Every structure is written in C-alpha cells, then in structure tokens.
Amino acid sequence: MDYFLSEEQQMIVDTARQLTDERIIPNRAELDEKHQFPRQILNEMARADLFGVPIPEEYGGLGGGCFDIVLTVEQLGRGCIGVGTAFSANFLGVYPIILAGTPEMKQKYLPDVASGKKFGAFGLTEANAGSDASGIQTTAVLDGDYWVLNGTKQWITNGGEAQIYTIVAITDRSRGPRGASLFVVEEGDPGFSCGPKEKKMGIRASSTTELIFKDCRIPKDRMIGRPGTGFITVMKTLDLSRPGIAALGVGLAQGALDEAVKYAKQRQQFGKPIIAFQAVQHMLADMAIGIESARALVYAAAKHIQEHPKDMSKASSICKVYATDVAMKVTTDAVQVMGGYGYMCEYPVEKMMRDAKILQIYEGTNQIQRNVIGQELNKEYS
Amino acid sequence: MKIIVCIKQVPDAKDVRLDPITNTLAREGVQSIMNPYDQYAVEEAVRLKEKCGGEVIVISMGPPQAEEILRQAISCGADNAILISDRSFAGADTWATAYTLEHAIKKIGNFDLIVCGKQAIDGDTAQVGPGLATRLDIPYITCVQKIREATESGLIAERMMDDGFDVVAVDYPALLSVVKDINEPRVPSIKGKMKAKKAEIVKFNAQTIEADPACIGLPGSPTKVVNVFPPSARGGRSVLTGTLDEQIDQLVEKLLPYL
C-alpha cells in the first residue's frame, strides 16, 4: 500500500532497504549460527547515515522523529531482528540523553553516536526487576565529586559492545518511584565490567550480557537530568522506542511472508504449486492481513507520537502489542506453510520464528503493555 | 589528489532480451544501471580521496538520462560530475569514445589519476581504459585488484593475472582499470543522496570539448555493429571419463575425423 512518503522519508527507506538486501540478508545465517555481533554491518549502517536518523541536526544527525526511525527499522527487521535489535537498543541508550541531558552532555555523546563511532546500551533490568522495574537494587551514592554505583544489570543488549551505557540506579530509596536516577557509564570506567554473552533462543547476533558495578566511580556530571527523575525519563524513553520494536515486528513478519509465498509458488504437490490450495492461500492471506494492519497501526502511532510527545503511552503500547503478536503468528505460520523445509536451518524461516518470540517479551512484556493500555483507558474516561 | 572516474550507463543485464523479429536488444522497459565495474571504480576513487585528501570527479559520455548514474556516484562520495552529451556522440565505438573522453579530460585540466571499471557489461571490450590512457600518453594498469600504497606522487597496485598477480608501481598521472575484487561498494548514505539530488551536473557537448566531428560518434568509429544475434544452440555434448590417458585416447579418436 502507498503511504505517500515524502522524498526524504523515501530516501531513508531506500537506504535501509539496500543495506538490508546487500549486507544483512546475505550474512544473517552465519551471524545467527556463530552468535556473532554484526559490527561490520553496523559500521556500514553508520556510514550510510542510518545512526543519524533520530539524532538532532545540531549534533550531526538528520533530525528525524519516531516515524523516520520506524521506517528505518522496519527494513532492518525484514533482514534480521538480531541486527535490528542491536541498532534499536543503541537508541534506547541514547534517548535519555536526548530527552533529559544537558547541552554539554548532548555535545559530548551525540555526535559520536550519529557517526557510529560509539554505540549505546540501556541498563534497567535486573535479576529481580523485570516487569517490576521499581524493584531494582543497583544504587548510586554521592562521594565528593563522584557517584559510586553498586549492583548488577541483567540481559542488557549491546553489553560488552557499547561504549555508552545509560544506567538506572536508586539514589534515594525513601522516595520510592521518585528515588531513581539515570547515569551515563562509559566503557573503561573503574569498577564497571560486563559479563559473558548469554546464549539465546533467537536474536543471536545481538549481544546480551550482565553489567556489573563494583564501587564504580563516575564523575558527578554523568547524571542525566535531575536526581529522582530516573523512572520518568525511563518511561518516556520506552514509550518513544516501542514503535521501533513494533516496526521490527512488521519487518520480520514481511520477510517471513515473502519467503512463504515464494516457496508456496514453486513447491509442487499433488500436481500443483501448493499456493493453488485454499488452505495454504487462506493462511497466506491471514498473514498478509496481519502485516498490513500492523504496519498501518505502527505508522499511525509513530506519527502521533512525533506530534504529541506528552500523549505517547497508549499509542505506543497498542502498536507494540499488536505488531509483535502478529510477528509471532506470521513467522510460525511461515514455518508451517514451508513444512519440513521450513523447519530446516537451511531455510530462513525457522530463525525468524525463533527470533520473533523476544518481541513479545522485551521493552515491556505484552502483558505489561495491556496493563498500560488499561490504565490509560481508565484515565481517559474519568 | 584529483581523481577522475569514467562511468557508463548500461542496460541491466538481467532484463536484457532480444527482440525476436529484429534481432536487436529490446530496450523498452529495461532498467538502466551504472556499469557494475564502474561502481567499484567510484568506490576505490572515493576511498583514495578519503585517505589522501582531494577531489573525485565522475564523468560519463552518454544520453541525457546518464545524469542518473552521475548523481548516484555523488551519493556514493564523488564530489563533482560532468555529463558529456551530444547527439553527435551517438553510435560511438571504443575508438571514438576514447577520443571523446580524452578531449573532455583535456578540458578538465590537470589530474593525478583516472579510474575506470575494467569493462562495460554491454560492450565487454575492456578497450576504453587502455585506449584513453594511450591517447593521453599516460601509463596505465589494468585489472587492478588492490591498491597497496598511494602517496602524493604515485601508487603501487596489484594487477590480477590468470595465475596470480603482478605488483606494479606507477607515478601520476596514470590510469587504472579495476576488477570487482578490489572492494565492496558502499551503500549510498542518506546525506549523500540529499547532496546528489541538489548537485549541479556540469554539461559538456561536442563544442565544449572542441571535438573534431569526424572523430566522434558513428563517423569516428572504425567498427560498426552490423548484427546482434544469440548463437544457435550447439548440440552433441559428451563428457569423457576414465583416467587421464583413457580420456586423451577417447579425445583423439573423436578429433581425428576432423583433421
């Protein structure tokens, strides 16, 4: 369907599409098999200016908004959401700086992110604090001109590969949800280390590690925003980045449908290509319906968020739930359409199905998203 | 460093079909692309500029629509572009093309390096690079698979041979023609595309380059394409098996009646 993109938006799509076709798709199977971080592909993406898309122009970026990121990431998702996750998590780490950082902090970090010289990562989750983010135990204590961090973050994307880590830590437990603050920890800061890479069901190209803080000392000016505003900035960050995750889902589902249709047209059984059979046609049709409706929803949500940054939550959660559930269903059905061949590692859809599951879990599980939507409805109607 | 890259717009090989009635290339609906070898030439020139500083100028002799590939080259890092276009250039073979490019380059002025793709995928002659260098009276290295070293005064390159490669040193000004092994062309950047969209393409015509009308286009071409046809399918293939000696015996048996 024609979404009447502007010339600049079409340039973004064309660039991301070409990069996906020429660099991601030919390498995705190997990256998956070796659990290998796609550094070279990310460097190429940086050279193509894709890392500059959401960075303000005055810091070397293209000054794009939520919709531009969605357009970029949808193409990457069609290739591999492992690579797409590495790209998206970079911005999860960087959005807090854009939203709440001082001009000096933005000048220090954003140009390097826009040029791809440095990658970001976002450290919120802990072993005992997933959906219940307020249960985090990592602390930050002021000692003279330094903050001293202690604690461990778990399952952090780009861990060990990023240079800039945005970390949420408790600065005043007595203030409850207003007692957390955000900090920038840099690779090489004393007392900061990363654990080994986790072995995962899918998105294996993405690096997932623990972040360990043992009396990690960082200069005072590394706090992002005012003390106690940590969770507010975190919520805004997640609201802003969820449409990107939804877009990964749309791209992934599209890639799976492309493979399934191609296969169904050439696989002959009972004297015909299997696409001639209604059972198969109906499955493919339902997959296409899911993808088009998810895409329309994600685009609408992203455009809304771009213009209404104070009214992001409901739209953001709705598109994330729907598109990621669609991605799981479509990739599973793609394996089914391709039958035995779909199950074999030689064909790309089994990886797509393994990859899809995380979309329903990270950046707020789809159950938490439904909580958010319910709470927003409650507020709206009071 | 001032580097000139010669590029050509060609039909996309995948789409090319023969018109069954006229036996000529059916061009309708066939996409035009930058000659693939030339993409590698542009990339290598841009890499040299990024390493040594300077300017990359892309030039193309072609119809007005060749402007597309010049803009594409700018989106990949070239700085300036010149379209060499004139009705009187039509029908040029490699001799007339090299003449035309020579005069265009003389109009541009001094340069350090010219980079070309090894050959165009429509003509497949690989003649223009060496022809151009000979006319300009500069040394050239063909089939360059790698530039080992580049300084302000010259470079050292690997020239691909059938069974390995030569290492060749040359001083500027010089010409290189490159093969696909030399690099992987970058994906054009978004900023590059925006620059390409706004770029002003300089236009040269036959007058600008002070070309002698007898030396350009069809009149200037000693060779003419008389016919294009697909070769008829040859029948009768057999695969010889057995030890090498046995295969040689069988082969000699088969060849004897033709001697």
Image (cartoon, rainbow, N blue to C red):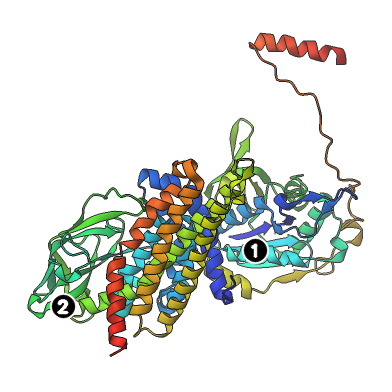
User: What amino acid type is highlighted by mark number 1?
Assistant: Ile
Quarter where residue B193 is shown: bottom right
The residue lying at 15 percent from left, 59 percent from top is A191
The answer to whether mark 1 and mark 2 are in CB contact below 8 A is: no
Residue drawn at 44 percent across, 70 percent down? A52
Compared across the picture, whether B173 is left or right of A341 comes to: right
Q: Is residue A104 visible?
A: no
Nearer to me, A142 or A247: A247
Whole-number angstrom distance, CA of label 1 to CA of label 2: 59 Å
* Location of mark 2 (residue): A177
Is label 1 on the same chain as label 2? no
Q: Is residue A109 left or right of residue B238?
A: left
> SS at mark 2?
helix
| Chain for disc number 1 | B
Vertical position of residue B237 compared to residue B40: above or below: above
Image: A250 above or below B99? below
What residue appears at the point 83 percent right and 66 percent down from the top-left corner?
A: B86
Instruction: For residue B118, say whether it is visible.
Output: yes
Would you place residue B183 above or below residue B105 in this image? above
**Chain of the residue under the numbered disc 2 shown in the image:** A
Instruction: Classify mark 1: helix, strand or loop.
Output: strand
Amino acid at pointer 2: Pro
Q: Nearer the viewer, residue A105 or A38?
A: A38
Residue B57 numbered mark, or none: 1
Q: In front: A59, or A234?
A: A234
Residue A23, position in %: x, y?
50, 53
Q: Is residue B99 left or right of residue A314?
A: right
